[in-house]
Image (cartoon, rainbow, N blue to C red):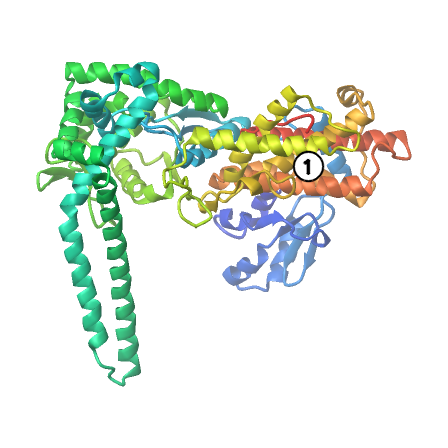
Amino acid sequence: MNILPELKSRFRVVLSELVDDPTELLGMIRPAQDAKFGDYQANVAMPLGKTLGKPPREIATEIVSKLDVSDICEPPEIAGPGFINLRLKDDWLVFRLNHAVGDQRLGVAADNEPRTYVLDYSSPNVAKPMHVGHIRSTVIGDSLSRTLRFLGHQVISDNHLGDWGTQFGMIIYGFKHFVDRNAYETAPVPELSRLYKLVNQLVEYHNAKAKLPTLESELAARTEAVATQRSQPATGDKAADKKAKKELGKLEAKVTEAAETLAATRAKLAAVEKDSKLSELADQHPNIASDVLEETAKLHRGDEENRRLWDEFLPKCREEIQKLYDRIDVKFDFEYGESFYHDRLAGVVEEFEKHGLARESEGAICVFMDGFDAPMIIRKKDGAFLYATTDLATIQFRIQQWKPDAILYVVDHRQGEHFEKFFAAAKLCGYPDVELCHVSFGTVLGDDGKPFKTRSGDTVGLEALLDEAVQRAYSVVSQNDDTKPNGPELGEAERRRVADAVGLGAIKYADLSHNRTSDYVFSYDKMLALTGNTATYLQYSYARVNGIFSKGSIDIAKLRADGTSIQIVEPAERALALELLRFSDALADVVEDYRPNQLTNYLFQLTKVFFSFYEQCPVLKAEADQTRNSRLLLCDLTARTIRQGLNLLGINVIDRM
C-alpha cells in the first residue's frame, strides 16, 4: 500500500460529495512540513470554504466526521482555520515495515492502472561525437524509463538518432574533398568528426561573409536610432519622459545585441582568414553551403555513391556512440533514426493535404493552426522535408506500432515552440487521446554562467567529461581510504572500480538532482563532495550502513529471513520508519511531472534521517537483542532503499568506500 495515494483515495470518497471533481483538492494532501502537525496534512477546507460559502473549520469538521482512515491513522485533528492533520498509527507503520523487509519491492506497489509509455530521449546526431549537451536528455530519459518500469508500466524507449540529413551531407562532401586516407583507415570516427567540423566551419564562414554587410548596416541604423532618441529634449511631463527613457533602454539593448552578433560573425571570419590553410580552402570552395545541400539531396534521392558512403560511415559512428552508452549503462528498446522514416514523409504531407489540414503558401506546404503566429512547414518550396515532417511520421508510426497512452520527448527547452506546434498538428491529424509531453530541461553552464565549454571554447566532449570525473573520483576515494584510522582497506583494482562508480554516478546525479527545467552550473568539486546532496554522499552512506553489518559480523540476509520483527519505540526510530515508507510517495512525485529530482531529494532526506537515527539509537550496542535486531533491519531497509533509489537513477552503489 502506497501511503499518499491511499489517503487521497479515502478523501476522494468524502470530497466527491462536496464538489464534482475533487482532483485539484486531492493535490493539497501532502506530507506535513513539521512533525508537530502529524505525518500528513490536508489543506482542502480553505478553498472549499470559498466555494461553499462556509467557514473552513466547519467544513473540515464535516470532512473528518465522514473520513474513514481509522485502520491506518489516529483520529484526525483539526488545527487553525481548518487544517486537517493526520498521524499514522505506530502499529500500522510496524506492519508495513515488516512487510517491506520480506518484499523485493520494499513495499512499493505497482500501479493498478498501468500505462504504455514511449520515451524518446538522448537522440544524438551520429555524425558528431556526443558532448556535454547530450548528458541531460540521456540520464533524465533513462531514469524516467527505469522508474516507470519499476512502477509496473510498459515502457518503450526509442533513441531517435540523427542519422540522416545535412550533417551527413557535410561529411560526404568533406570525405570527397578533404579526407586524410591514412587517418581514416587508422581511426575513422575522429577523421569523420574532423571532416564535419571543417566543412561546417567553411559553410559558416561563407554564410557569415554574406551576412556581414547587413549586420554592419543594422548596427549603424540601431546606433543612429539611439543617438536620435538621446537628442530628444525632456518635455517636463513625467509620464512622457519615463516612456522616452524606457524606449531608449530598449534601443540600447538592440544596439548591444547587434554589436554582439556582429562581433561573433567577425570572429568566425577571422578564425578562417588568419589560418592560411583554412583561408585557401574557403577560397577554393566558395559554394560549399549549396554543394553540401546538394550532397544531402543526392543521398535522399538514393544516389549510389552517397548511399554507399552513408552505409559505410553510419556503423562506425554508431559503434563509437555505443561505447559511451555501455559505459554509462544506458540501453534502448529501439533505435529508429530519422532515416527509418524517410520513405514515409511524402505520405505524411499527402495525408495532411487530403484532409485539408495543410495548404500551399509561397510554394511551401504549411499547416496553419490557431494560436500560432507562423505556420508549421512540412515541405519546403524546393520539395525538401523538415524535422517537423519527420516528427509527424514518427508519431504516426509509434501510435500504429505500439498504441501508447503517452509519448514523452526528453528534449531541451529551446525546442519548446517546435513541440507546441508539433503537438497541435498531431492532435489535428487524429491523435487526441495520447498524452504528448515535452519533458524539457535547462542548460549545463560553466562558472561564467554560459554554456559549459572547454578553455578553447569548444563544446566539452562527453567521453572527456566522464574520464575527468572518474579520475577526480579516484583521488577522492584514495584520499578517503588513506586516512582511515586503521589504514587503507582498498586495493588498487577496487579503488579503480569504486572510482568508476563514484565518478559516473556523480555526473548523473549532479544533473538529476536539479529541477530539470533549470539551468545548473557544472562543478566537479561539488558533485564529488562527501557531504551534501550528491551521489558520492549517498554511495558513501550506503557503504557506511554495510560497514555496520561487517563490523558486527551480521548475516543480514539470514536475519531478514528469520522472522525478526521491527519495533518502534524511540522517536528517531519512528521518524526513520515513516521516511522509509515514503519511498512510494517520492516515486509517485517523479511520475506526476516527470521530475527525477523528486527522487534525489527523497534519498538525501532519507540519509539525513537515518544518520539522526544512528546517532540517537545504538545499533550494535543496543541493550537488548530484540532491539538490536530491529534496528539492524531498519538499517537494512535504509540501505536497500538507497540502492533501489540509486538504481532508478542509473547509479551503482559500492559496498566499501
Image quadrant holding the N terminus, namely top right
Q: Is residue 281 left or right of residue 611?
A: left
The 10 Å Cα crowd at callout 1, few under 14, some 14 to 19, many 20 or more, is many
Quadrant in which residue 473 is drawn: top right
Relative height, residue 32 to residue 95 (above, below): below
Return the residue nearer the eye: 65 or 268.
268
Could you tell me residue 656's position as x and y percent?
69, 26
SS of the residue under disc 1: helix
At x 55% / y 27%, what residue is drawn?
A: 150
Could you tell me residue 228's position as x and y percent?
18, 72
Could you tell me residue 622's position as x and y percent?
87, 35
Image quadrant holding the C terminus, namely top right
Q: Is residue 418 left or right of residue 222?
A: right
Return the residue nearer the eye: 176 or 505.
176
- Tell me the residue that label 1 is attached to: 580
Q: Is residue 244 visible?
A: yes
Q: Is residue 589 visible?
A: no
At x 62% / y 42%, what residue is drawn?
A: 7
Amino acid bearing label 1:
Leu
Relative height, residue 334 to residue 604 (above, below): above
Instruction: Farthest residue to the right: give it.
Output: 623
Return the residue nearer the eye: 30 or 253.
253
Return the residue nearer the eye: 587 or 131.
131
At x 23% / y 44%, what residue is drawn?
A: 270
At x 41% / y 36%, what residue is drawn?
A: 460
Relative height, residue 419 to residue 173 (above, below): below
Quadrant in which residue 155 is drawn: top left
Quadrant in which residue 126 is drawn: top left
